[in-house]
Amino acid sequence: MKGKEFGVGKKNKSYIEEFFEFGSKRDDWFYGYVFIDFDNIYSGVIDIIPDLFKKEENDKEKLDKIYYWLDKIIDAIIKHYKNEKIYIRGIVAYANFNSLPYSNKLNIIDYLHKNGIKTVFPYIRNNKDMSDRALIIGVIEEIFFNPVYIDYIILLTGDIDYLPLLDFINSKTDKFIELISFENRFNSAYKNIYYLKGKIKFIDELIGINSRDSEDKKYIRILKDFLEAKKLNISEGINFEKTIRNLNNYYIYKFDNEKLKQCIEKIKNENT
């Protein structure tokens, strides 16, 4: 976390460690609890690492990059709420952790536990919605059955499926709501909800990136790498069918005719 580079821990205390050493709440502070739709947020992390997707890239380099960005996001969120005088009582992540990319190599549950983050893994085969349902139940339990009072429910997701939960919190409880998401993973329907005005934060702003650009840049960088490796020149024309087949064999993210055409046009525009 703070003081780390690419997943290698140093002796500096993280914001989470500082928070849990903070002790009792000051009079002018609020309590908050963070719930992470980790499938959604982890996918956002993958999106912002364009060069992660070479199948033959060194596994350790991939994992270090993922750890680095997860550290950066968690630190930024904790720092943000510290500045807002909201004391984070706990953080819990919900996901089908076995289905996450690189889950066979990345011990993500161990990583989260080491950073003081609880995990819930309600795995049922072929049912990807179980972690969403578990998160909803977790929020309700925290509001009604935890004897320790909290003021804020902070939800990390861009998934619109949680709108009924937010409606319930707003109309039936006295809790404040905060929503945090990658901009490219965020369902814009949330922006129209009156009680979320001013309550939506983008990870992009907190860590200084643009996830919407990252999606396009990812594909463009992949295509540029491929063209350079194959010594192909798009100005001379390329075989679309063969290129798509080779790209999809070589990289994890998939191209189709439309995606390849868009990327070629953007590369041409860069060169003019």
Image (cartoon, rainbow, N blue to C red):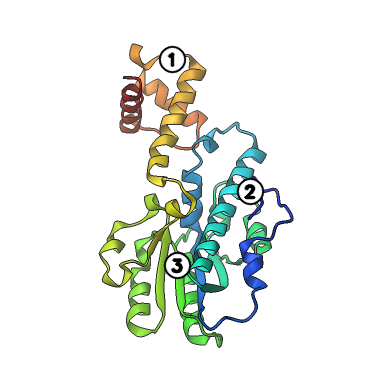
Q: Nearer the viewer, mark 1 or mark 3?
A: 3
Q: Position of residue 123 (x, y in %)?
A: 55, 64
In three-dimensional space, the C-alpha distance between marks 2 and 1, rounded to whole angstroms, equals 35 Å
Q: Quadrant of the C terminus?
A: top left
Q: Nearer the viewer, mark 2 or mark 3?
A: 3
For residue 67, above or below residue 194:
above
**Nearest the camera: 166 or 128?**
166
Q: Inspect this view and state whether residue 116 appears.
A: no
Contact between labelled residues 3 and 2, with CB atoms less than 8 Å apart = no
Q: Quadrant of residue 89?
A: bottom right
Q: Earlier in the sequence, mark 2 or mark 1?
A: 2
Name the residue type under label 3: Leu
Q: Which residue in the protein does label 3 denote?
A: 155
> Within 10 Å of the Cα at label 1, are there few (<14), some (14-19), or many (20+) other Cα atoms?
few
Q: Position of residue 174 (x, y in %)?
A: 39, 84
Q: Which residue in the protein does label 1 denote?
A: 232
Does residue 230 appear left or right of residue 119 in this picture? Answer: left
In three-dimensional space, the C-alpha distance between marks 1 and 3, rounded to whole angstroms, equals 46 Å
Residue at 48 percent across and 66 percent down: it is: 130
Q: Which residue in the protein does label 2 denote?
A: 104
Residue at 70 percent across and 48 percent down: it is: 8
Which residue is the extreme one toward the right?
Answer: 11
Does residue 113 appear left or right of residue 36 in this picture? Answer: right
In three-dimensional space, the C-alpha distance between marks 2 and 3, rounded to whole angstroms, equals 27 Å
Contact between labelled residues 3 and 1, with CB atoms less than 8 Å apart = no
Q: Earlier in the sequence, mark 1 or mark 3?
A: 3
Q: Position of residue 177 (x, y in %)?
A: 40, 73
Q: Earlier in the sequence, mark 2 or mark 3?
A: 2
